[in-house]
Amino acid sequence: MMKPLLTLLWTLFLALPLHAGPVRIKDLVEFDGVRGNDLIGYGLVVGLNGTGDGIRNAPFTEDIMANILERLGVNVTGEQFRPKNVAAVFVTASLPPFARAGSKIDITVSAIGDAKSLLGGTLVMTPLNAADGQIYAVAQGTVIAGGASSEGDGASVVQGVPTAGVVPNGARVEREIDFDFTQLDSIRLALRTPDFTTAERIEDAINRSFGRVVSRMLDSGTVLLDIKATQALSPAHAIGEIENLRVDPERKARVVVDQRSGTIVMGADVRISRVAVSQGNLTLRIQEQPLVVQPNPFSQGTPIVVPRTEVGIEEEPGVNLAEVPVGTDLSEVIAGLNALGVSPRGMIDILKSIKAAGALHAEFIVR
């Protein structure tokens, strides 16, 4: 039986806590109205050491550079310039909630042409627009690229992603979001992982904190907080009183498998029913070794090729589990398979088969 064997093994693959412990409400929910906004802009990075866009392959780079120069009073109409130290880029950022004019935010710069690297470049002043088309920030600064590249006449090497980088505090907020948070009469708490039990526990924790009913669960992903019932000075004060309350969250039993890296991650509540598993590898080998037969000397015959084929079947010793008891933790099964020498790929195949047999009681996610 596998159970006595597993009791003597260390959990080699992973160790799972029996209880996650209470978590703050701020780490479980998103507050309605407290959200960021995505910004995007199209700009130009200059000062590159010959690693910029090829103008013939990226004509939009020439257009934006001509527009910038004309705004600065430089007439380039009809001029032919082929610089290699500029690159067209997309600039993206996230405008934090309640960001005020004058505050700074981080930005990400990504090349959109055939530039080889943005290392050492400087982003020229670029307006950042939101989904409504309005400009909310202006970006400018030195790009910090996340990689390096080098090439010669016959070979090249690239490490990381030199065509993308960041500019810390590279954008200044110029327009504020028109949203009056103080006028809210109620706030919805949206659970990041919807669950009826967790939502009910959040409702109970908030009501116990205020000593009266001030919140109500609407569904598995929403809890409504009544600001007037809390008698707080403002919605901000009400959120400040509840966001650090701790709740024991519930979560679904889930197994996540990454086939590319052979990674297996699972929750502590994953269980399997009684099941028997046998796993082995079957290898079929076919090898062609044709034989050439030459004619006798001074004869008028021609050489003949006689086929010779070697066929063989090899079966490697597999893993045979007589039976897995009911209610066994999947982590124990994984530890046992790992101790018996099963490869990560073999473990993934076994887990798929157990799930197909209906013995794995968890959500099975393959990536």
Image (cartoon, rainbow, N blue to C red):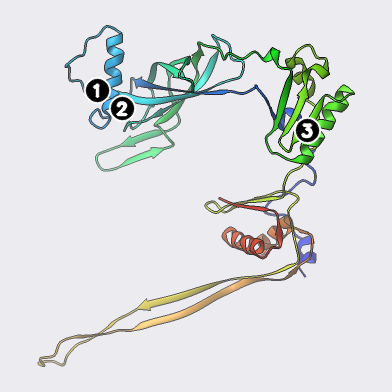
* 267 horizontally vs 202: left or right: left
**Quarter occupied by residue 306:** bottom left
Residue annotated with mark 3: 217
Residues tagged 1 and 2 counted as in contact (Cβ below 8 A): yes
* Gap between marks 1 and 2 measured at Cα: 8 Å
Comparing 94 with 224, the one in front is 224
* Image position of 249 with respect to 186: above or below: below
Residue linked to disc 1? 83
Q: Position of residue 36 (x, y in %)?
A: 58, 23
Q: How far across and how far down the image is residue 201, in percent?
A: 81, 35
Q: Is residue 59 visible?
A: yes
For marks 1 and 3, the one nearer the N-term is 1
Q: Amino acid at mark 3?
A: Met
Q: Nearer the viewer, mark 1 or mark 3?
A: 3
In the rendering, at what x and y percent does residue 346 appear? 59, 62
**Horizontal relation, residue 99 to residue 272: left or right:** left
Position of residue 308 relative to residue 266, above or below, is: below
Question: Dot 2 lies on which element?
Answer: loop
- Residue 82 or residue 29, whichever sits in front: 29
Residue for point 73% across, 44% down: 251
Location of the N terminus by quadrant is: bottom right
Residue occupying the point 49% across, 79% down: 313
Numbered label attached to residue 52: 2
**Is label 1 in a helix, a strand or a loop?**
loop
Q: Amino acid at mark 2?
A: Gly
